Amino acid sequence: MTYLNADLHCHSRVSDGTLSPEDLAARAKANGVELWALTDHDEVGGQHRALAAARAQGMAYLTGTEISVTFADTTVHIVGLGFDPDDAQLARGLAATRGGRAERAQEMAAQLAQVGIRNAFEGALKFVGNPDLISRTHFARYLVETGVCKDTAEVFRRFLTEGKPGYVPHRWATLGDAVRWITEAGGLAVIAHPARYRFTATEEYALFSEFKQHGGRGVEVVTGSHTAAEYVTYADMAQEFGLAASRGSDFHSPDESHTDLGTLPPLPGALTPVWELLAHRIQRPAA
Ligand code: AMP
Ligand code: MN
Ligand code: MN
Ligand code: MN
């Protein structure tokens, strides 16, 4: 396997990132990324801009998204890569998945008001680039802006997560639907940052085996949310389950993300990179 600086996971203002697709493309290029994918949460609205920006930068591109899924009462993220960005079934599925975010946000604000944090809905909305996609990240930015917390990491320790003020559980897509929407649109489904989920070994095994049964083919091994030890754990899991491996920073913002675009270590050897399975879906700039 020849080394390729691929970064197949990041967010723009179309979901909960702070940069435009164009600024992300420029930053990826400046950091040496050779193959890029923008993977906004539950949304493909930035794909045509990202592709055009990648072309303008002379960088190869794979379409991307990150779908919110509920599995075993836990939110799991499934990244889709290399699909047709105009696929109608995928668009409908993502629209249904986004639905309910506004009501959830109102409930989050009501809970925050009970602990003395006022106007959180309006405050979060100021940070939203896409009105369909108000997320916990936007609330986190408001709590930092108002000085309630010093950074977003502190927000997610004290608020917005299970058992803390501002946490509103939500039913997202099913695992089977998310994998099917991606696959039937010509793409490849990838389990995002598996070490982030607080699963028992049995639940994690169920996630990987059901994902495989639904036609999922990849897992993120090297991501901004994994430690070096977790790279090894999930390299082993990829081999055990016959999954290809992906690499992505999960970059959201120059002010918040500890891992910049294109700066992660390479995938451990012996794994099949997802981009080898997606060679026919890569959009290459004109030579
Ligand atoms: P939502 O889709 O509204 O539930 O928001 C999920 C987003 O919140 C994730 O994609 C991250 O960007 C952010 N997030 C969740 N947990 C954390 C955390 N512990 N630290 C930083 N960001 C987090
Ligand atoms: Mn996010
Ligand atoms: Mn995620
Ligand atoms: Mn992400």
Image (cartoon, rainbow, N blue to C red):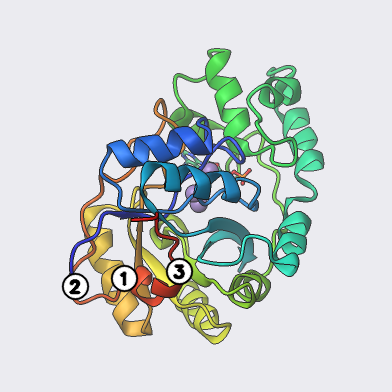
Q: Is residue 239 above or below residue 130?
A: below
Residue 196's x, y, as percent?
A: 43, 55
Q: Is residue 248 visible?
A: yes
Nearest to N terminus: mark 1 or mark 3:
3
Contact, mark 2 vs mark 1 (Cβ under 8 Å): yes
Q: Nearer the viewer, mark 3 or mark 2?
A: 2
Q: Which residue is mark 1?
A: 273
Q: Which residue is mark 3?
A: 200
Q: Secondary structure at mark 1?
A: loop
Residue 17's x, y, as percent?
A: 52, 36
Q: Is residue 271 above or below residue 96?
A: below
Point 68% across, 69% down: residue: 174
CA separation, marks 1 and 3? Answer: 27 Å
Q: Nearer the viewer, mark 1 or mark 3?
A: 1
Quadrant showing the N terminus: bottom left
| Residue 27: quarter of image | top left
Q: Secondary structure at mark 3?
A: loop
Q: Is residue 50 above or below residue 229?
A: above
Residue 279's x, y, as percent?
A: 39, 72
Point 44% across, 37% down: residue: 24
Q: Which residue is mark 2?
A: 1
Q: Is residue 259 visible?
A: no
As drawn, is 232 to the left or to the right of 285?
left
Choose between 228 and 79: the one closer to the eye. 79
Nearest to N terminus: mark 3 or mark 2:
2
CA separation, marks 2 and 1? Answer: 9 Å
Quadrant showing the C terminus: bottom left
Q: Amino acid at mark 1?
A: Pro
Point 41% across, 25% down: residue: 255
Contact, mark 3 vs mark 2 (Cβ under 8 Å): no
